[in-house]
Image (cartoon, helix red, strand yellow):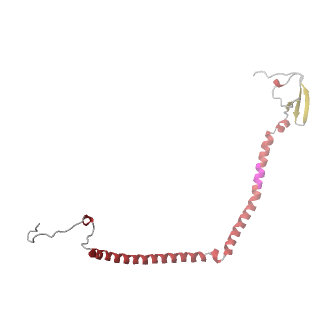
Amino acid sequence: MTNGSHGPLPFQDYTISDFVADLRAPTPSAAAELVLPEKRELSARLGELGKDLRRALARSLDEARRRLEDVLKAGVFVTPSALWEAKRQSLDELDRRLEMSMPRNLENKREILRTRMARLEALSPLACLKRGYGVVFDEGSGAIIKSVNRVKVGGQIVARLADGSLTARITGVRPKENE
């Protein structure tokens, strides 16, 4: 091959890696020279990062020391009895409020109890007896008789009234007529 005016071109040997590499060095020595500046730059950068790390650590330690000093200056560490006193005052206040509310709560509960007892008394079978009603039982079994169909002429019943009971013999039964 010839190069126009300069004569034949020298033959150059290329490898495939020469075509894909970002940087090519013609000799191993040239490759070492290319790598060496990067090594120096990396070493310098590592030194800077180390300094940055030491500064950040020092700032972090200073901040932690400052926060610890602030906490130690807080009332509970300076005068622990102050915390105790505040809690005692709070407890005294709660005790005072409880003592004030107990009689009021007790009276409210008594009123509720009186109301419920009056309702219960109104629904009591004994209250019905006091109004003139009675409860009828079969004398033999003691079962409450709720229907005329449950008794027989000649049988005996017991009628419970407000002030006692009486025994009676069945002489007749009159079923309720349809209304």
Q: Quadrant of residue 33?
A: bottom left
In this rendered view, identify the residue nearer to me: 25 or 150: 25
Report x, y in % for residue 97.
72, 62
- For the stretch drawn in magenta, the main secondary structure is helix
Q: Is residue 45 above or below residue 14?
A: below
Report x, y in % for residue 19.
24, 65
Q: Residue at image x 90%, y 36%?
A: 164
Report x, y in % for residue 102.
76, 58
In this rendered view, identify the residue nearer to me: 73 or 147: 73
Q: Is residue 161 above or below residue 170?
A: below
In this rendered view, identify the residue nearer to me: 54 or 18: 18
Q: Quadrant of the C terminus?
A: top right
Q: Quadrant of residue 26?
A: bottom left
In this rendered view, identify the residue nearer to me: 13 or 139: 13
| Magenta range | 106-112
Q: Residue at image x 74%, y 59%?
A: 101
